[in-house]
Amino acid sequence: MRSAKVMQRVKLLLLLLVVPFVFSCEEKHDVAGLDRFSQSQLVVWNRHLSEIIIKDIFSPPVASRIYSYPNIAAYEALAPAYPAYQSLSSQLNGLVNVPQPEEGKELYLPVSSIIAFSTVGQKLVLDELKVQEYEAAYLAQVKEIGIREEVLHNSIDYGRQVGEHILAWAKKDGYVETRALTRHVVSNEPGAWQPTAPDYMPAVEPHWNKIRPFAMDSAAQCKPKTPTAFDSLATSDFYKDAMEVYEIVKNIDDEKLLIARFWDDNPNVSYTTGHVMYFKQKLTPPGHWMSITSSAIRKNKLDMMEAAETYVMVATALADGFISCWDAKYAYNSIRPDTYIERYIDADWDPILQTPPFPEYPSGHSVISAAAATVLTHKFGDNYAFVDSTQLAIGLPTRTFNSFNEAAIEVGESRIYGGIHFRPACDLGAEQGKTVGNLILTKLRTRRMDQTAQL
């Protein structure tokens, strides 16, 4: 009897030791924790992308392309988890047959979404290793929260498939081919663009209109109105436009100076001290509006799918805005205020901001800001007040706006205050940008037809 009782106690002791071990070997799969973590990840990854774009010193048009493709990949990889949403396949020019999840495989699509973003992003920037570091850190966090190994493997595999599909589509947009095209030939016509001080750089991206648009039928679909005809006579409208810029810069006050610098967004400003020239890198114009978009997403606590939808619509508006604007810039090839004022008004005049190296009309800032503001207004409303803290990173204070359109209007004014644009380039550029934004909203349908809600 005693021997039997001893054996029972031994068995019970072994059971008490083995059961916790068995449970400890089970894979932790914390869906609620993963969902909470995933909600902010597209904001985090767009910030990562901005940091790399700044360091890699991409021009504004190129930056807009870099923001677009990863966000499209993220959207496409996540959409199958949300029945109300649909793919942008056959809506975006040239995008077809985006891979769908394989039936019977368990996936966690928020992970697939970030992997798709990372897969695309690292091939569009110079610092590919940095993106890989971000991805490794992200996956370590996912594992720490808890996800079954098989689900993680399936999710990563699907994200890579979507990312590679988007990369194959991106390779056909004409970007690579434009790298080999000739430089812009500077014209000696009186009203033509000339390289400006201090660097006298050649014109940036003169063939950007050859890039395949995302939603527009062609680069010329959203043409701006004709600008003021060039004239050097003091009685002409063009001269009056130049005098407005001249007087504003000459008598600029602190508020206008702050506005000019707040929206400068020149990715690579040169400074000269004695015989030494150095450069400072900053956020690009599309990066500034992606930052504003991130702020609105955080403030409204959008879930990951709605955040993906918002990012993809804004990024597409920015990208097509640049294609449309650059098509007009090199068609009109307009002289900059710096050149005109020094030639016809005051030889010693200098603008507040460093003049960007491309033709004046229309204002790129005004076009893409109006395009982004149009999309954001459709999403968040006409009277969406917000605080823009984007420039705290470079020591400038926050600015408060009552709407996205109010911010876009200030962007146009900032280019006049900075001495780098005439008013028609800003006002008519804003009209062009609104046309682009409305086209994006009309052509791209993120929600299925049976859903009443739409971006």
Image (cartoon, helix red, strand yellow):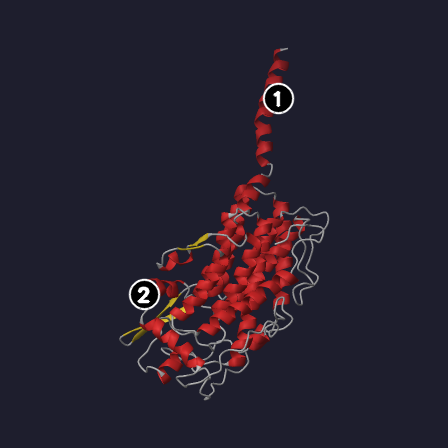
Decide if residue 270 is on the left or right side of residue 382.
left
Q: With respect to residue 44, does 58 lie above or below?
A: below
Q: Position of residue 11 (x, y in %)?
A: 61, 21
Q: Amino acid at mark 2?
A: Asp
Of residue 158 and residue 410, the one placed in the foreground of this image is 410
Q: With respect to residue 22, does 258 lie above or below?
A: below
Decide if residue 411 is on the left or right side of residue 442.
left
Q: With respect to residue 289, does 323 lie above or below?
A: below
Farthest residue, direction bottom:
188
Of residue 10 and residue 313, the one placed in the foreground of this image is 313
Q: Mark number for residue 219?
A: none
Q: Position of residue 196 (x, y in %)?
A: 39, 79
Give SS at disc 1: helix
Determine the CA span between mark 2 and mark 1: 87 Å
Farthest residue, direction top:
1
Farthest residue, direction front:
235
Q: With respect to residue 57, does 111 lie above or below?
A: above
Decide if residue 258 is on the left or right side of residue 364.
left
Q: Earlier in the sequence, mark 2 or mark 1?
A: 1
Which residue corresponds to mark 2? 253
Residue at 57% across, 56% down? 378
Which residue corresponds to mark 1? 11
Give SS at disc 2: loop
Callout 1 crowding tier (Cα within 10 Å): few <14, some 14–19, many ≥20:
few
